Image (spheres, grey):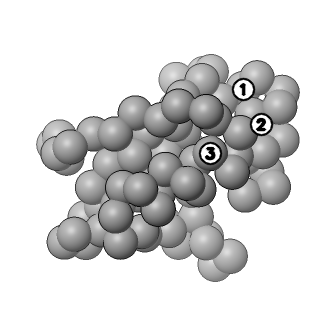
Amino acid sequence: MTELQTLYREHQLLEAIIEPSSLEGGWIVEFRHQCGELVLLTDELGEERHYPNAERASQSAMKVGFTQVRIESQKFE
């Protein structure tokens, strides 16, 4: 989280995206980096962090600094 907050303050993160995870019913948070890559919000072990709903995922994205998030309603392959 601290690293993401630093990237946000340095204007390197362009948007926060909430989308369904590969786990049924879960949600993940990704950030679009200015170089075009997606940066995943992970836990202390480096694993993708899962949330039970889009609202909780949005709250984590907002802790990074974003005031708006984009919520994808379905996973695109």
- Give the residue number, with chain letter if any, for mark 3: 62
Residue furthest to the bottom in view is 45
* Figure check: 11 above or below 5: above
Q: Position of residue 64 (x, y in %)?
A: 70, 46
Q: Residues within 10 Å of mark 3 (few under 14, many from 20)?
A: some
Q: Mark 2 or mark 1, which is nearer the start of the sequence?
A: 2
Residue at horizontal 22 percent and vertical 69 percent from the top: 25
For this rendering, which residue is in front, 68 or 14? 68
Q: Could you say which disc has been placed on residue 12 in the image?
A: 1
Residue at horizontal 62 percent and vertical 45 percent from the top: 62
Q: Position of residue 39 (x, y in %)?
A: 56, 44
Q: Secondary structure at mark 2?
A: helix
Residue at horizontal 77 percent and vertical 36 percent from the top: 7
What amino acid type should be assigned to the residue bearing mark 1? Gln
Q: CA distance from mark 3 to mark 2?
A: 14 Å
What amino acid type should be assigned to the residue bearing mark 2? Leu
What amino acid type should be assigned to the residue bearing mark 3? Met
Residue at horizontal 72 percent and vertical 26 percent from the top: 12
